[in-house]
Amino acid sequence: MVRRVGPDMVQGIELAPLSPPSNLTAELVRRLAAEIRAGRLSPGDRLPTEQALMRQAGVSRTVVREAVSALRAEGMVTTRQGVGAFVADPAARGQVRIDPGEMRSVADVVQVIELRIAIESEAAGLAAERRDPSGMAAIQAAAQAFALAVESGDGAVLQDLAFHRAIFAATGNDFFPRFLEFLGPLLIPRQTIGQHLEEGAARLAYLRRVQDEHARITAAITAGHAAAARLAMRRHLAASRDRYAKLARHLAARDHQ
């Protein structure tokens, strides 16, 4: 059993500060997952607090929260509101999931988006057909939160994830949110391959396009137009697929030069 030595950490878990790699979230996920797989954190052990992880790894609160969310999606940790994150029992982890480690290229990400097109288009249609008031409110709030994050200069990864989760929850089918968790950090590709993407004004222009697409999806769902909601979601994800397919071709051409 691992001996606890304080409220913030467990003995043997002292992370060195992360140097700025291509993606801080992915690197923190990798390191924490390695601690769990090596048995230095046992099932039921509490992860270090947000403050401890921020201090040890030298990263922001957003990076820590994204990393914990990714680990939860992988079934490696569970979270308790107001208490913290705990290592999950391996026997309870889902057997069907897409491991981010399998995503070795941008082309792999494109394939995941193709899967999402099929599932999420139907989710948007069901959300429009069922129009649960609380579900509608959650979708609208998530779309607004994304817009505010974009205007503040944030990458809006968490807000983007929240928008898609709200739509899955609004289907009224509990299996849709469960499927979404299988995708984990792969749901928002720029979270895992951000080093290849545009920055500055180009990134802002892209996020504003996404904001407009979210608005169209939200409007169709709110109006109860299932066909329009499916089409709006399909167009949204198809645009993402085409963006990453273009990037994949660019990287492949560069590597062959």
Image (spheres, rainbow, N blue to C red):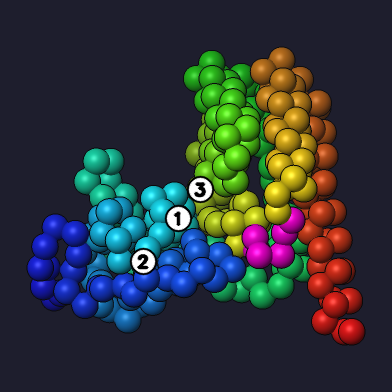
Q: Earlier in the sequence, mark 2 or mark 3?
A: 2
Circle 2: element type: helix
Is residue 67 shown in magenta? no
- Point out the stretch of residues depicted in magenta: 193-198
Q: Earlier in the sequence, mark 1 or mark 2?
A: 2
Measure the C-alpha gap from mark 1 to mark 3: 23 Å
The C terminus sits in image quarter: bottom right
What is the x, y in percent for residue 229?
A: 75, 28
Q: Amino acid at mark 3?
A: Arg
Return the residue at label 1. Answer: 63
What is the x, y in percent for residue 14?
A: 26, 73
User: Dots 1 and 2: beta carbons under 8 Å?
Assistant: yes
How packed mark 3 is, by other alpha carbons closer than 10 Å (few <14, some 14-19, many 20 or more), is some
Return the residue at label 3. Answer: 178
Measure the C-alpha gap from mark 1 to mark 2: 10 Å
Circle 1: element type: helix
User: Dots 1 and 3: beta carbons under 8 Å?
Assistant: no
Residue 8 in which image quadrant: bottom left
| Residue 159 visible, this angle | yes
Return the residue at label 2. Answer: 57
Indicate which disc residue 134 carries: none
Circle 3: element type: helix
The N terminus sits in image quarter: bottom left
- Of residue 230 and residue 45, the one placed in the foreground of this image is 45
Residue in view at x 79 percent, y 59 percent: 244
Measure the C-alpha gap from mark 2 to mark 3: 30 Å
Q: Amino acid at mark 2?
A: Ala
